[in-house]
Image: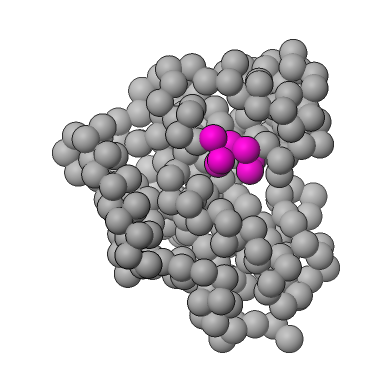
């Protein structure tokens, strides 16, 4: 999908450092196309990531599933003519770096609703599923988007933790999800794993190779370096 990709090979930990450096360099040079790519060698073991199943032979689909306001996390006009979908990973540095651009979609794109769906890269991001569960747990208290934004902003502080639960609980309090016991229970019980699994299954059915992966009205887009370049590419698929 993208012109410049970062991918893993060999040692996962060492490659992650290389990828992070590559992304920073690309951003510094002004290149807008980057993708955090799935490792060809799954390394996940234990923890919350182990609760997320990775389909061996998913039934292929050609476009994201239809927007459903009852199930999807979205911003913008629910009745918009155009649908922008991001598949992202809460622990993905590229997703965090690209967030300021995607935050503008619902307001800068013509008559467009922005939809976020999960694609945790469990092969390389040990806290990806727990972070997604944290976003969902905050969402149960009406603070989904606030928590999602803070998780991206603070990503460097929690991505390497052996167990980030207490840190996530503090973030939840900061954004106004004040029932800490409920928040933590919803994570440890994996209460909201089902929608994360559903999104992940969809991503594999689409044969997505990394994050962020973005679509406009069912058509894949490159991750342009700013909102203007993204809008220009999307114009060909605009429903007026």
Determine the main secondary structure of the stretch shown in magenta: helix
- On screen, residue 80 versus residue 231, left or right, reads right
Res 55 visible: no
Question: At 81% from the left edge and 36% from the top edge, which residue is drawn?
Answer: 142
Residue 230: x %, y % from top left: 53, 73
Q: Which residues are magenta?
A: 148-154
Res 217 visible: yes
Question: At 24% from the left edge and 44% from the top edge, which residue is drawn?
Answer: 18
- In this rendered view, identify the residue nearer to me: 153 or 218: 153
Image quadrant where one finds the C terminus: bottom right
Q: How is the image coloured?
A: one colour
Residue 238: x %, y % from top left: 65, 82
Residue 191: x %, y % from top left: 68, 25
Query: How many numbered marks appear?
Result: 0
- On screen, residue 166 versus residue 49, left or right, reads right
Image quadrant where one finds the N terminus: bottom left
| 192 drawn magenta | no
Question: At 71% from the left edge and 44% from the top edge, which residue is drawn?
Answer: 145
Q: Quadrant of residue 207?
A: bottom left
Question: At 72% from the left edge and 78% from the top edge, which residue is drawn?
Answer: 110
Residue 216: x %, y % from top left: 59, 71
Query: Which residue extends farthest top?
Result: 181
Does 162 appear above or below 131?
A: above
Query: Which residue extends farthest left?
Result: 10
Does 74 appear above or below 83?
A: above
């Amino acid at each position: 999908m993208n012109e410049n990709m970062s991918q893993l090979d060999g040692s996962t930990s060492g490659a992650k450092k290389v990828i992070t450096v590559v992304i920073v360099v690309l951003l510094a040079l002004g290149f807008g196309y980057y993708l955090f790519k799935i490792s060809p060698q799954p390394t996940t073991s234990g923890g919350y990531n182990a609760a997320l199943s990775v389909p061996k032979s998913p039934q292929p689909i050609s476009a994201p599933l239809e927007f459903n306001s009852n199930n999807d996390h979205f911003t913008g006009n629910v009745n918009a003519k155009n649908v922008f979908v991001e598949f992202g990973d809460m622990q993905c540095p590229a997703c965090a770096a690209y967030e300021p651009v995607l935050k503008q979609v619902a307001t800068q794109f013509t008559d467009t609703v922005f939809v976020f769906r999960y694609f945790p890269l469990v092969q390389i991001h040990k806290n990806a599923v727990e972070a997604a569960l944290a976003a969902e747990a905050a969402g149960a208290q009406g603070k989904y988007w606030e928590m999602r934004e803070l998780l991206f902003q603070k990503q460097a502080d929690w991505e390497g933790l052996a167990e980030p639960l207490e840190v996530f609980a503090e973030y939840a309090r900061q954004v106004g999800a004040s029932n800490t016991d409920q928040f933590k229970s919803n994570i440890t019980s994996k209460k909201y794993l089902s929608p994360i699994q559903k999104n992940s299954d969809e991503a594999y059915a689409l044969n997505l190779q990394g994050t962020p992966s973005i679509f406009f009205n069912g058509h894949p887009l490159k991750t342009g370096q700013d909102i203007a370049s993204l809008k220009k590419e999307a114009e060909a698929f605009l429903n007026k």
